[in-house]
Amino acid sequence: MIDTPHGPARAEIHPPRDGEPRAALLLGHGAGGGFKARDLQAVTAVARELGYLVAHVEQPYLVAGRKSPAPTHQLDAAWLAVVEHLDLGGLRLVTGGRSSGARVACRTAAAAGAVAVLCLAFPVHPPGKPEKSRLDELDGVEVPVLVVQGERDPFGMPPGAPGREVVAVPGTHSFAAAGLPALTEAARGWLTQR
């Protein structure tokens, strides 16, 4: 448990499969769920195989048992408090997450000192409301970004851009089981380069 300005957060640490960690990956959860999401589980397994220490960061609202996410400024402040608290021993830091967690990682990348950001199911806009775009959060990231997105995601498909790779896989916002091999392959190649 880690104190933040908006209540305690939880960080669950998963060491690399073998040896000392070569880098760290901090992952945030989606708005309504935890870390049982199969895409987060798949990325965690791949990262650990590659020598990453992986931390699952559970936001204070979820720790407190609330279902509705906190406002963005509270999510960002809590995330940065966790980053500051964790002793990563100078490891290169990749941040990321699924959906809402990906948005937090994008908005805080510079302040967290991230060398890259991994986005799973980035919600480009609310379903059916493309005029309410959140693309500026992705565009504001100045380090390499990988976005893995379901090809039928009702939250939209972000465009590729310099420094941003977008991989479309089978599924919607929660990904289909058929999309996990492509997601895993994309994450493995991209994380290896970091």
Image: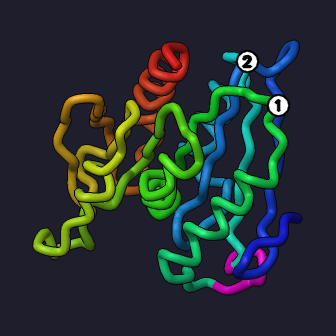
The residue at 68%/80% (across/down) is 61
The residue at 64%/27% (across/down) is 92
Write down the region rendered in magenta. Answer: 61-66
Residue 145: image quadrant is top left
| Nearer to me, 59 or 91 | 91
Residue 48: image quadrant is top right
State which tag comes first along the sequence, 2 or 1. Answer: 2
Apparent side of residue 23 relative to residue 143 in the rendered image (left or right): right
Residue 10 percent across, percent down from the top left = 80, 63
Inspect the image, locate mark 1, and give the three-letter code of the amino acid beneath it.
Gly
What kind of element bears circle 2?
loop
Reading the image, the residue beneath label 2 is 22
Residue 99 lies within the magenta run: no
The residue at 25%/49% (across/down) is 139
Q: Is residue 175 above or below residue 185?
A: below
Residue 151 percent across, percent down from the top left = 24, 44
Inspect the image, locate mark 2, and give the three-letter code of the amino acid beneath it.
Arg
The residue at 21%/30% (across/down) is 162
| Nearer to me, 69 or 33 | 69
Apparent side of residue 149 relative to residue 46 in the rendered image (left or right): left
Q: Is residue 26 above or below residue 136?
A: above
Kindly identify which numbered label has been placed on residue 89. Answer: 1
- Whole-number angstrom distance, CA of label 2 to CA of label 1: 10 Å
